[in-house]
Amino acid sequence: MSYIELDKSPVEVYNRLNVLLANYQIYYQNMRGFHWNVKGENFFELHVKFEEFYTVAADKIDEVAERILTLGGTPLHTFNDYIEISSIEVVKNLQDGKQIMEHVWNMHNTLLSIMRDAVKIASEQDDDGSQDMLSPMISELEKTNWMVGSWLRK
């Protein structure tokens, strides 16, 4: 049951938001691992940055899950579900800061692609609320990834 009145079915939107949720959960867990395991000359800088990234991700995860509920869907909530549908792969035991930042760059691009697709679907379904939630997320992550790219000298 949707808790809002929409002219079109929200199913496509909340299904796509569940894909975003799954990818954000894998991203979040990867960031936790990066935060704990990074080594090298950039340790202090990256250790703090990865904590910042996973803290922001936790808020986004909750926001996306609550939007799915608002639309009448059920947010995915098991790691099996996340791993099964996520495009972002689990990264294990990586310690090199530059290699980690390459993964961060790629994960951000994946999340951005999913968000843009979800905005397109929400627009087609006349779902202004989902668009309004996703648009600032996109802008924020684009800026963050510009900074990651600058760090990597892309």
Image (spheres, helix red, strand yellow):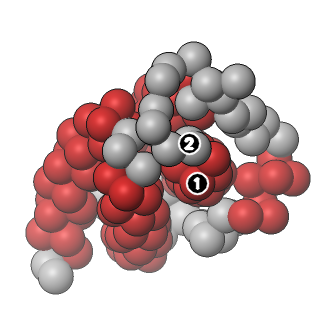
Left or right of 28 on screen, residue 41: left
| Quarter containing the C terminus | bottom left
Q: Nearer the viewer, residue 69 or 141?
A: 69
Q: Residue at x 30, y 37 (%)?
A: 128
Left or right of 13 on screen, residue 25: right
> Residue 23's x, y, as percent?
58, 56
Query: Seen from this angle, which residue lies furthest top?
Result: 3
Q: Amino acid at mark 2?
A: Pro
Q: Which residue is mark 2?
A: 10
> Residue 150's x, y, as percent?
12, 69
Q: Nearer the viewer, residue 94 or 113?
A: 113
Left or right of 131 on screen, residue 1: right
Label 2, secondary structure: give it.
loop
Instruction: Measure the alpha-carbon separation of dots 2 and 1.
Output: 6 Å
Label 1, secondary structure: give it.
helix
Answer yes or no: do the residues labelled 2 and 1 have beta carbons within 8 Å? yes
Tell me, for residue 12, which label it has, or none.
Answer: 1
Q: Nearer the viewer, residue 102 or 58?
A: 58
| Quarter containing the N terminus | top right
Residue 91 in the image: above or below residue 13: below
> Residue 26's x, y, as percent?
63, 53
The answer to whether one can see residue 97 in this image is: no
> What is the crowding at mark 1: few (fewer than 14 residues within 10 Å), some, or many (at least 20)?
some
